[in-house]
Amino acid sequence: SRIEKFNARPAFPEEAEKAAAVVLADIRAKGDAAVMRAVAKFEGFKVAKASALKVACDVRQLEKSIDPKILKAVKDAHRRVLRFSKASLRRDWSMKTPRGGKAGEFFTPMDRVGVYIPGGTAPLASTSVMTVTLAKAAGVREIVACTPAGRDGKVNPVLLYALKLAGATEIYRVGGIQAIGMMAF
């Protein structure tokens, strides 16, 4: 049946998986230069040096450029997600065992995490708030965010604002497999 055929298909087309593997291998071997090449090829803008991929933004300037209703919506969403995130954190616990020992669990945040925020045709400020806020609430000190820029090399200001509000410590205008490779390697 059509449903069985649909369910039996591979998760990704084989050619897409091979293309991604080539990009990842290049980034692993050649680092920033390979990331810059991939950004130019797949995202349509060039930078002279890898440090230009890092986004510097002033929250006050962003606030001035965004409709107040949208600012309020982002702030409200952040407040709700932060409250939920804090409430859902697991607590350390322990118990005594029958022969005088102890068993339990403890929870320690990672030092550094990377989050990927889709941003092409529909910049997802909601994904920024949900992923970065959770990491921040868990106590992660360094939160690296990657999101694609437009062909002009600019990132949507609402998305940037949401990332900064949520607690991203570094933001890079890099999308696709090259963003994943950059964060991984």
Image (cartoon, rainbow, N blue to C red):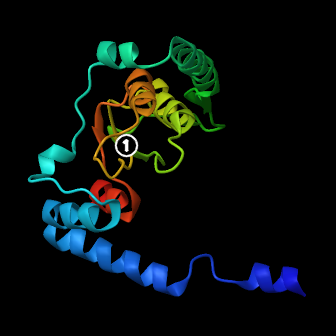
Residue at 53% of width from left, 15% of height from top? 75
Q: With respect to residue 87, does 127 lie above or below?
A: below
Q: Can you see residue 103?
A: no
The spot of residue 96 in percent (x, y) is 61, 31
Q: Residue furthest left?
A: 48
Q: Secondary structure at mark 1?
A: strand
Residue at 16% of width from left, 60% of height from top? 32
Q: With respect to residue 101, does 59 lie above or below?
A: above
Q: Residue furthest right?
A: 1
Q: Residue furthest front?
A: 152
Q: Can you see residue 13?
A: yes
Position of residue 23 in the picture relative to residue 17 (left or right): left
Residue at 57% of width from left, 77% of height from top? 12
Figure quadrant of residue 164: top left
The spot of residue 166 in percent (x, y) is 44, 25
The residue under label 1 is which amino acid type?
Val
Quarter the N terminus occupies: bottom right
The spot of residue 18 in percent (x, y) is 41, 84
Nearer to me, 110 or 121? 121
The spot of residue 182 in percent (x, y) is 27, 57
* Figure label count: 1
Position of residue 1 in the picture relative to residue 143 (left or right): right
- How many other residues sit within 10 Å of disc 1, few (<14), some (14-19) or many (≥20)? some
Quarter the C terminus occupies: bottom left
Residue bearing mark 1: 113
Nearer to me, 101 or 170? 170
Position of residue 62 in the picture relative to residue 103 (left or right): left
